[in-house]
Amino acid sequence: MTEAEALPVFADVDTGVDDAMALAYLFASDDAHVVGIASTAGNVPVDQVCTNNFGLLELCGRTGIPVSRGADGPLSIPLRTAEDTHGPEGLGYARLPPVDGRLTDYDAAQAWVRAAREHPGKLVGLAVGPLTNLALAMRIEPALPRLLRRLVIMGGAFGYRGNTTPVSEWNVHVDPEAASEVFNVWGAAWGLEKPSHLPIVLGLNLTEHAAMTPSTLGRLAAAAGSSTTPMSVLDDRGTRSAAANPLIRVLEDAMRFYFEFHFDQGEGYLAHLHDPLAAAVALDPDLVRYRQATVDVELTGTLTRGMTVADWSGAWGRYPNAHIGVEVDPEAFFDRFIARVGPFAASLVS
Ligand code: BDR
Ligand code: CA
C-alpha cells in the first residue's frame, strides 16, 4: 500500500510502555500513515513524553513525524504521574537514543486541529492518554468531531473495576473533566444523525484481555529474526535484554518493568497491552465487538470520581455517544501485532 492510500492517523499519547508499543504497531503498519503525535502529560510529565516520542521515532527511523507538546497538566486539577507502573522515565528499564528533537511551533491541541483540517473526513484519531489536549482541541475547533473519520479512545472501565481507584481507569482518572467534555461534546456534535461516527471507547473491561506474556514477547523476537532474553518471574529484577535487534531490545527492557508491575499488583507475570489494542482497532475496528451506549464521567462523587458510567438501556433519555468495546479475540490481536512489528523490527537492521 502506498503512503497516499494508507489511513492518516493522529496519535495522542502519554508514552508510557504500552503507548510505545502502540506507536511501534502504527509505524509497522503499511495501512497507516502517522501524520502527527500529540504528547500528553500522564504516565510521565509532558516533557518526558516528548523525549520518549523523539527517542522512539529515532529508533524506528520515523524522524519526519511531527511531535507536539501538550499542556503541562489536566484542565483543572494537578497532574498525577505513574512512574511506579512505567518506570522513572516512562519506558521501564529501556534507554532510548538521546535525540535533540524539534517540537512543532504549535501545541498538541492545535496539532489535532491542523491534522483534522488537513485530512477532512479522512483522519483517524487515536487517544491513549488523558484527554486533556483533545478537549482543548475541541474548544479551538468545535467541528472537530465532524472532521474526523474515526476516533478511538483507550479509557474508562465499563461494568468492571478500575485500575487507579476501585472504579476509575488511569486515563480518565488523570483528567476526568477532559474526558467528560470529550464524551459530551462529541456526542452532541453527532447526536443520532450518524451513530457510526461516535467514538470507539475501549475500557479496561476489554483491554485487559490483551495480556502479553514472556512467551508472546519471545514470539515477537523470533518474528524479528532476533535473539531474545527469555524472561521469568524468577529473574533478578531489572535484568537487561541482550536481544540483537535494537527495537526488540528496547521493547523487552520496557516490558520487563511492566511485567514486574503487574506481578506486584497480583495479576501474574504478564502485562496488559491497552494502547496497542486501541491502535490496532484504530486501523481495523472489526477486531472488536461493540455496544452503543451513553457514557458520562462521575465528577463529584467522593468515592466514585473518575468513574465512567454507561447507560446501556437509555434510562437517561440522552443520545448514545460511544461505541463501547465489549468483546475481542486476543489471539487474533497478538497474531497481528507480531506479524507487523516483528518484520518491521527486522527491517530496521537490514
Ligand atoms: C492506560 O493507562 C496508562 O498507564 C496506559 O498507558 C494506558 O493508556 C490504562 O489504564
Ligand atoms: Ca497511555
Image (spheres, helix red, strand yellow):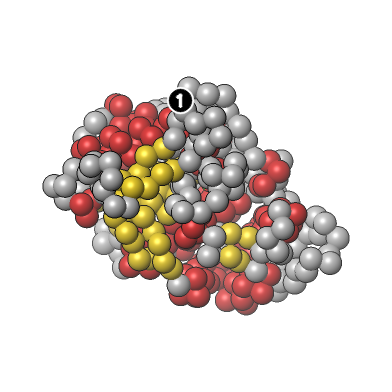
Residue 229 left/right relative to 274: right
> Where does residue 126 sit, x and y in percent of width and height?
39, 49
Residue depicted at 49% across the width and 71% down the height: 330
Q: Quadrant of the N terminus?
A: bottom left
Examine the image and state in which quarter residue 233 appears.
bottom right
- Residue under label 1: 75
Whether residue 9 is situated above or below residue 304 in the rendered picture: below
> Where does residue 93 sit, x and y in percent of width and height?
73, 51
Tell me: is circle 1 under 8 Å from ligand 2.
no
| Residue 121 appears in the picture as rendered | yes
Residue nearest the viewer, comparing 339 with 235: 235
Examine the image and state in which quarter residue 131 appears.
top left
> Where does residue 336 sit, x and y in percent of width and height?
46, 72
Residue at the far front: name it: 315
Q: Amino acid at mark 1?
A: Leu
Residue depicted at 86% across the width and 60% down the height: 236
For disc 1, the neighbor class at 10 Å (few under 14, some 14 to 19, many from 20) is some
Residue nearest the viewer, comparing 49 with 146: 146
> Where does residue 286 sit, x and y in percent of width and height?
33, 67
